Amino acid sequence: MKPAAVGSRWQQIRLGAHNVLPACLAVIPLGLALGVLLVRTGLPWWSAPLLAGLVFAGSLEFLLIGLLAVAAPLSHIALTTMVVNFRHVFYAISFPLHKVRGRGAKAYSMFALTDEAYALTMEAERENYSSARILSIQSLFHASWTISVLAGALLTGLIPESIKGLDFAVTALFTVLAIEAYKAYRSLPLSLLALISAVVASWIAPQSMMVVAMVMFLIGLSVAYLLRRGTKESEGSHAR
């Protein structure tokens, strides 16, 4: 029994690695850019793995470099962090945290809930994801990001200031993830709602586009749920 359990666990880890590999590759250019920016801002190279490993918040890390460089007050840093990462509140609603076993594992999974981890665990078959698979997705992406940022800091002198096309890698990744999500769920109304939310938010609040878009999307989902629930109750009453 024990060897079979171990084998099953390693199989789940391999499946998680297969899921996250494209994201790990796509995030390398962004990690290198963060490492280069960190050193060129005047921060020591060894702060690169600390920032990437302990903060692990993508866009927030780019903002933190500027805030740290000018010695911004903690209150300013805290407010910036809340605004930028507020979208994670919505991620937590549907992230399969209940599949993760163990208090320590759950704590790490909550810490490592990034945009990529959320997108990669939103497949139609996610209810079949094991704790090992979810944690392998998150930990391998975490390791890839940290190593990329450290590499950028160590190789600053060898990396050109601008490489055409690399800045589109993460955008391309999320485009592919969105297409795959649509293939899995085949929900045109939800896709249109997400697109409209993003377009309207970028128009009315470009500086806070993500937060506004997520709020609009959540409101739209709530309205759709209430309408569907009301329709089902109405059909049930007529049937009786």
Image (cartoon, rainbow, N blue to C red):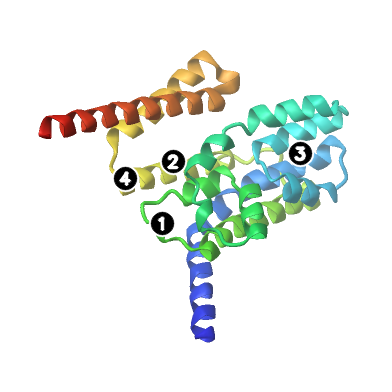
- What residue is drawn where x is 56% and y is 54%? 25
Pair 3/1: label in front: 1
Pair 3/4: label in front: 4
> Gap between marks 4 and 2, in whole Å?
16 Å
Q: Which mark is residue 185?
A: 4
Say whether disc 1 or disc 4 marks the residue closer to the N-terminus: 1
> Gap between marks 3 and 4, in whole Å?
39 Å
Q: Is residue 36 above or below residue 14?
A: above
Neighbourhood count class around disc 4 (C-alpha, 10 Å): few under 14, some 14–19, many 20 upward:
few
Asked if the residue at tag 4 contacts the one at tag 3, i.e. Cβ–Cβ closer than 8 Å, the answer is no
Secondary structure of the residue carrying numbered label 3:
helix
Label 3 sits on residue: 37
Residue 240 place in picture, x, y as percent:
12, 34
Say whether disc 4 or disc 2 marks the residue closer to the N-terminus: 2
> Gap between marks 1 and 4, in whole Å?
14 Å
Asked if the residue at tag 2 contacts the one at tag 3, i.e. Cβ–Cβ closer than 8 Å, the answer is no
Say whether disc 3 or disc 2 marks the residue closer to the N-terminus: 3
Label 2 sits on residue: 175
Report the label total: 4
Residue 183 place in picture, x, y as percent:
31, 47
Q: Amino acid at mark 1?
A: Glu
Say whether disc 3 or disc 4 marks the residue closer to the N-terminus: 3
Residue 52 place in picture, x, y as percent:
73, 48
Residue farthest toward the front in the current orientation of the protein: 240
Q: Amino acid at mark 4?
A: Tyr
Label 1 sits on residue: 127
> Gap between marks 3 and 2, in whole Å?
26 Å
Q: Is residue 63 left or right of residue 239?
A: right
- What residue is drawn where x is 49% and y is 83%? 4
Q: Is residue 173 left or right of residue 32?
A: left
Neighbourhood count class around disc 1 (C-alpha, 10 Å): few under 14, some 14–19, many 20 upward:
few
Asked if the residue at tag 4 contacts the one at tag 1, i.e. Cβ–Cβ closer than 8 Å, the answer is no
